Image (cartoon, rainbow, N blue to C red):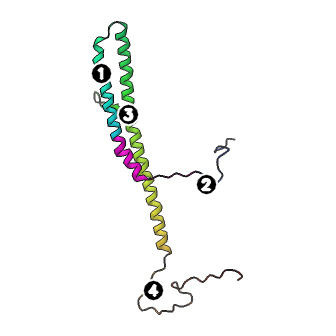
Amino acid sequence: MTVPFAPDAPTSYEDAGKAIWVMPGIMHYNAHVSMKAEIAAIVECWNVIADTWNGLKLSWVGESASAADAFNERLDKVQDELFGEPEKDGKDGKPGIFGLIRVVAVQAASNYDNAEYSVHKMFDTLREALSVPEPPPGAPEKQPENSLYNPIQITYGKI
């Protein structure tokens, strides 16, 4: 029989000793704006390297030329994996790892934000359900003993 959890996993959620602390707005900004700018900067550097490398291609001959071609093919594959492949010959393009990471981070921020909103809404609904409404206009100041508007009497100690 297999154990569904690691042997050292906490038996209670409260015993975990770990917490996830997320600020969805900052997470979304970093993924949607900052990361987009960082990827653009990487693309610029990549293009400088590619232009330099392509300028050197003319000077390769013999075995060096075939080695340079093999290197270019590998470099093109790496570029496609990082940045994605554009549409070619009617085939859909393929997203790159940078784009996928960005999309996942934006979605995670949205999920955290939705969870936070749902919990907030749930507690608002609970608070509203637990709050005592104001007595109707014209109601007597002293409410009957079993009235909803009277405070709850609590006696501590011996009953």
Q: Which residue is mark 2?
A: 13
Q: Which residue is mark 3?
A: 96
Name the residue at 58% across, 51% down: 18
Q: Position of residue 2 (x, y in %)?
A: 67, 41
Q: Which residues are magenta?
A: 18-36
Which mark sits nearer the N-terminus, 4 or 3? 3
Quadrant including the N terminus = top right
Distance from Cα at disc 1 to Cα at disc 4: 81 Å
Secondary element at tag 4: loop
Q: Name the kind of residue labelled 3 in the image.
A: Gly
Q: Is residue 15 something one can see in this rendering? A: yes
Between 18 and 102, the one nearer to me in the picture: 18
Q: Which residue is mark 4?
A: 135
Distance from Cα at disc 2 to Cα at disc 4: 42 Å
Q: Decide: few, some or many residues near mark 2? Use Cα within 10 Å; few <14, some 14-19, many ≥20.
A: few
Res 47 quadrant in image = top left
Q: Decide: few, some or many residues near mark 3? Use Cα within 10 Å; few <14, some 14-19, many ≥20.
A: some
Q: Position of residue 124 (x, y in %)?
A: 46, 68
Name the residue at 38% across, 45% down: 31
